[in-house]
Amino acid sequence: MRKFWISSLIVVAIMVLFTGCLPPSQADIERAIRETQSAQKTLFPSPTKTAKPTAQICNIELDMKKEWKTIFCDTFENNKNQWWIGNDLDMGLSTSISNGKYIIDYSSKNATGYKSGFYTALNFADAQDYIITITGEIKSNYKNCNWGIIVRGDYLNGYEFSIDNQGNYFLTYVGPTANDFIGNLKYGSHSAIRWDRPNTITAIIEGKNLSFFVNDEPIITYESDNAMNKEISWSVWAAEGVSAIYELDDLLIREK
């Protein structure tokens, strides 16, 4: 109602201006048009423009595959992705987030004559073709412990690339196999893997092609049996009787 009433006043004003003894001059017409346009801008201002949603902001630096889309980013400043935090006394395990890191603290005793150990893998994302990078560190006086990632499957049927705190890497098929041991596909040592310091694992997964890097240095490539499984996990392992603290940080996934 208010909009119609004010518009009517504008029309009346123009009619009064144009009705009289003499025809309106060109200057009068132009002035009336300007006044009308000014009134309309005041009464009906342009709508405020709302900023469009921006891409996910991620402060993790990764020079490879910058053109791919970031779908997962966590610097562990908080627990925004709802990682498990707590204690498992039976496993001798506790987890927490502190100082920008996800911390897995494992301490066990020899209960079976060193025939078992601790192994956990957590599926946290799915993607078809992608690049993943994660930084981790093992703090332990023991040798028999490692950490890594599982791609194209989970802990029952995937491909795990892991490293230990002694400069060694392991590529393992964790599904049913006669060669059921860590590194059953390939293992070795590499100068790029730092002893007793943080290391960054990066993997590029495209179709059946799996490429793994440590600290930006290429380590190994492998062709998987399938190109369709989207599951992605991180994993940690320690032999029985080993005590170790795993610190994970700067987890990033970009999808093609």
Image: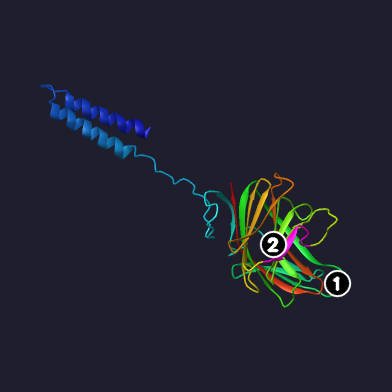
From the viewer's side, name the closer residue of 79 and 103: 103
Q: Which residue is mark 2?
A: 148
Helix, strand, or loop for circle 1? Answer: loop
Residue sitting farthest toward the bottom: 141
Q: Specify whether residue 84 is in view.
A: no
Q: Which mark is residue 114?
A: 1
Distance in Å between CA atoms under marks 1 and 2? 22 Å
Residue 12: image quadrant is: top left
On whether residue 146 falls in the magenta region, the answer is: no
Q: Which residues are magenta?
A: 182-189
- Give, as a three-letter code, the residue at label 2: Gly
On the image, the x and y values in percent for residue 5 come to 33, 31
Residue 90: image quadrant is: bottom right
Q: Specify whether residue 181 is in view.
A: yes
From the viewer's side, name the closer residue of 61 and 88: 61
On whether residue 184 falls in the magenta region, the answer is: yes
113 in relation to 66, above or below: below
Judge the density around disc 2: few (<14), some (14-19), many (≥20) Cα neighbours within 10 Å. Answer: many
Sequence-wise first label, 1 or 2 = 1
